[in-house]
Image (spheres, rainbow, N blue to C red):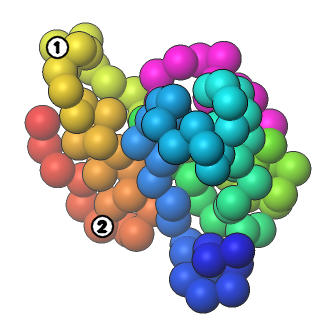
Amino acid sequence: MVNELFVKPDIIVISNVRQDHLSTLGQDKQEIARSFARSVPKGTVVISGEQNEVLNEYMRKEVEKRGSVLKQVKIPPEHKGLIGAETVHALNLVLEEANETPLPF
């Protein structure tokens, strides 16, 4: 509701889907992913740092049903397993969407 009525974002970054906020977003990761995807307004680009391919495909389908696009963060092998790598690499996708120069890594 906040995204549709107040913020109206062009880009949304979902860093990951974890089982925090179980009381408000769902009882398992699929329900949480669905909650995230259903909060996306039409025409928004979603940058997903979630590395679970099944959850990403599920979110992609839900986001596309809403008339939006999901782009997956790719973490290079040398950064896999580093805490926060998905967030750092999401930054370049955001910069690309904003027609800015990506950062060199």
Q: Residues within 10 Å of mark 2 (few under 14, many from 20)?
A: few
- In percent of the image, x 55 and y 75: which residue is there? 9
Give the answer, above or below, for where 64 lies relative to 16: below
Q: Which type of secondary structure does the marked residue at label 2 adopt?
A: loop
- In percent of the image, x 38 and y 68: which residue is there? 99
Q: Amino acid at mark 1?
A: Glu
Which residue is most to the right? 65
- Split into 4 quadrants, where in the image is the C terminus? top left
- In percent of the image, x 69 and y 60: which residue is there? 39
Which residue is most to the bottom? 6
Q: Which residues are magenta?
A: 50-61
Foreground residue, 33 or 77?
Answer: 33
> What main secondary structure does the magenta stretch of the protein show?
helix
Q: Nearer the viewer, mark 1 or mark 2?
A: 1
| Magenta stretch encompasses residue 64 | no
- Split into 4 quadrants, where in the image is the N terminus? bottom right
Foreground residue, 68 or 39?
Answer: 39
**Residue tagged 1:** 78
Which residue is most to the left? 105
Which percent across, then down, holds residue 86?
A: 32, 34
| Magenta stretch encompasses residue 60 | yes
Give the answer, above or below, for where 71 lies relative to 77: below
Q: Which type of secondary structure does the marked residue at label 1 adopt?
A: helix
Which percent across, then down, holds residue 47?
A: 50, 48
Q: Residues within 10 Å of mark 1 (few under 14, many from 20)?
A: few
In the shown orientation, is residue 95 left or right of residue 12? left
**Residue tagged 2:** 100
Q: Amino acid at mark 2?
A: Glu
- In percent of the image, x 35 and y 45: which residue is there? 90
Q: Quadrant of residue 73?
A: top left
